[in-house]
Image: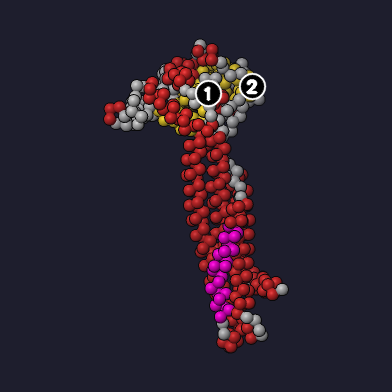
Amino acid sequence: MKWQKLFRAALDSILKNRMRSLLTMLGIIIGVGAVAILVSLGQSAQSAISGEIAGLGANLLIITPEQSDAGGVRGQTGNQNEITLADVDALRAQSTELGAVSPATYAPAQIVGGIGNWASQVAGVTPEYLAVRNWEVADGTFFTQDEVDSRAKVAVIGQTVADELFPGQRPIGAQIRVRNVPFRVIGLLEAQGGGLGGDDEDNVVLAPVTTVQNRLRGSDNVDVVWASTADPDRSDAAEREVKAIFRQLNGIRDEGEQVVEVQSQASIQETFDTVLGALTALLGAIAGISLVVGGIGIMNIMLVSVTERTREIGIRLAVGARGSDVLTQFLIEAVLLCLFGGLLGTALAFAFAAIASAVAPFEVSVGLEVVAIAVLFSAAIGVFFGFYPARKAARLDPIDALRYE
């Protein structure tokens, strides 16, 4: 019963001075809102990037040529190691840890066909590419190993290329030209959506790797080897095996010298998680400073309130109230101000998330755990910064308080 009276008295005090209470809460509103918004942005970005990394493929290994130390200068032009199709064939034959393996060579080009032309990326790959990238053909077929061996001029196009060149039409059987080389469209890839780093994964033309090498690149080298591990839990072993095979192929005995760089899907995910987690924590900590500033504002206003209500406190003490009652009432008042501010700040964060989701490339959502932590933290700030004014009020001498003008 006593707690109910103290709570009602604190609430009445806040409601009697609505404008001042709102201004008092402003720091907490901004602080809680900033913490919730920044942490939610970080978590949403982390979730979106995790989805994009997962969309790269299944148990993926990305093998690229390592910079060579030949000539004593690392990274100098011409010092890049090379991977050829013969290396990829040897990798397939010798590896016991890998599943599907597909070399890839890329050639940006203007694609001519249908109703006009469109800038896209032509990727020369093998039939295993679909399995490695966990991709499917939505219409038509994918090219075969025989078509790779015969350097057939066939292509499978992404949804973006189809939409730009063949809007409202079925592109299967149509002809496109890439650098004046005609290709027959035999398949349409299923929509993949946005890729890592904001690239459009669907803006691609897939063709046999040998065709791209001979018709578009004039080089036998491949840019990257996409591979999947046979056992998802043995990506580290597969990575070591790939490096060992390439060292053997290049006659290198020193295990410290590498011919290729191998990145696993798990390591990419771990790197992004670490960076984004640290960035989110940093932004949250910076925003948390505004919460502390808001708490100092609460304390200042509470001190002013104690001074203004000195006679009221004196009367309460004179008629039998104890110092602990006065302390509790002021503490409740401070906590309520912070809680209301926290709730309004949370509402601000939800409003921001709705707006950001409409304009950002990924959905921004405010997690319930973020809301709970922000509101509880604001309540703790109310207790911390409200204690000093409350204690000052509780320790007032009733006689001096009644004489206060």
Judging by the rendered image, the residue that carries numbered circle 1 is 100
**Going from the N terminus, do you reach mark 1 or mark 2 first?**
1
The residue sitting at 56% across, 87% down in the picture is 400
Q: Which amino acid does label 1 sit on?
A: Ala
Q: Could you tell whether 81 is left or right of 267 in the image?
A: left
Above or below: residue 168 compared with residue 375: above
The residue sitting at 53% across, 35% down in the picture is 53
Query: Dividing the picture into quarters, in which one does residue 19 lie?
Result: bottom right
- Residue 290 badge: none
Question: Residue 14 placed where, x, y %?
Answer: 64, 71
Judging by the rendered image, the residue that carries numbered circle 2 is 139
Question: Residue 205 placed where, x, y %?
Answer: 54, 23
**Quadrant including the N terminus:** bottom right
Above or below: residue 19 compared with residue 221: below
Q: Which amino acid does label 2 sit on?
A: Asp
The residue closer to the viewer here, 374 or 324, is 324
Query: Dividing the picture into quarters, in which one does residue 137 lie?
Result: top right
Magenta segment boundaries in residue numbering: 374-395
Question: Residue 131 placed where, x, y %?
Answer: 56, 24
The residue sitting at 43% across, 30% down in the picture is 240
The residue closer to the viewer here, 105 or 239, is 239
Above or below: residue 68 compared with residue 29: above
Residue 97 seen anywhere in this rendered image of the structure: yes
